[in-house]
Image (cartoon, rainbow, N blue to C red):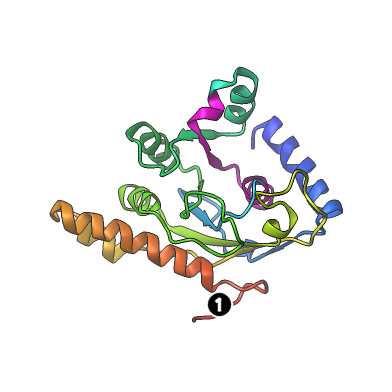
Amino acid sequence: MKLHYRFSWYVLRAIFTVYFRWRVVGVERIPMDGPVVFASNHASFLDPPLIGASVPREASFLARESLFRFPLLGAVIRSINAVPVDRDGKSPRGLKAILDRLSTGMPVVLFPEGTRTRDGRLLPARSGVGLAVVKSGAPVVPIRIFGSFESYSRKMWFPRPCKISVVYGDPIDFGSLLEEAKGKDKARTKQIYSEVSDRIMNAIGELRPDGSYSVS
């Protein structure tokens, strides 16, 4: 990790331990080298730093393009590997930035839902994450964060000290679908993007606080 990234990593871990009494489950499932897509539910502005502080590797994050218009904020989030993208994560420039990071072996954090939930329930996945996975060929680690909505939902001005758990699932290899996507017509390729996104979101939804899976 870069020096300032590591410093932020330790500071955030201390804050989350004291204020949120956080718990990280399944970190041993994280591949420690090579490209990885970390795919998480999205309930709060707390989610990106919660993932960043729980992953024992330096990672890249997505941030709305509009945030980079503010010079100071833009400089800060660029320093922690933020990637400017549109909300769907499907703009050519945003996708290229994601694929460039993955091609160097750096993990990238994606939120398949595309936006924060308004009521705490999981939202359907958008196809952007499937597109990134198919184009990169990277394995996907599903993540489910419990408690961040109760702590800092859209309606709150300041985070509450609720207990938070960050749970990592087993890596998912989409090898068969990646092979099928090669040389297929445009309509079928789009279907594959959606299938990959849906499978990722299903895996997120099946994760439980203890790291086990519960198939509905």
- Residue at point 61%, 30% (across, down): 77
> Residue drawn 69% across and 49% down?
155
Residue 97 painted magenta: no
Q: Up-down: is 170 above or below 131?
A: below
Q: With 84 as the anchor, is 198 left or right in this view? A: left
The residue closer to the viewer here, 6 or 73, is 73
- Where does residue 129 sit, x and y in percent of width and height? 40, 51
Q: Which residues are magenta?
A: 46-68
Residue lying at the far front in this picture: please name it. Answer: 155
Q: Which residue is mark 1?
A: 213
Q: Is residue 20 above or below residue 98?
A: below
Q: Is residue 61 left or right of residue 46?
A: left
Three-letter code, disc 1: Tyr
Indicate the position of residue 55 as horizontal and vertical percent values: 63, 51
What quarter of the picture does the N terminus occupy?
top right
Picture quadrant where residue 214 is located: bottom right
Residue 28 in view in this figure: yes
> In this image, 117 relative to 15: left or right?
left
At 50% from the left and 81% from the top, the residue drawn is: 215
Q: Position of residue 36 (x, y in %)?
A: 47, 51
Q: Residue at x 17, y 55 (%)?
A: 187
The location of residue 16, given as percent across then percent down, is: 79, 51
The image quarter in which residue 6 lies:
top right
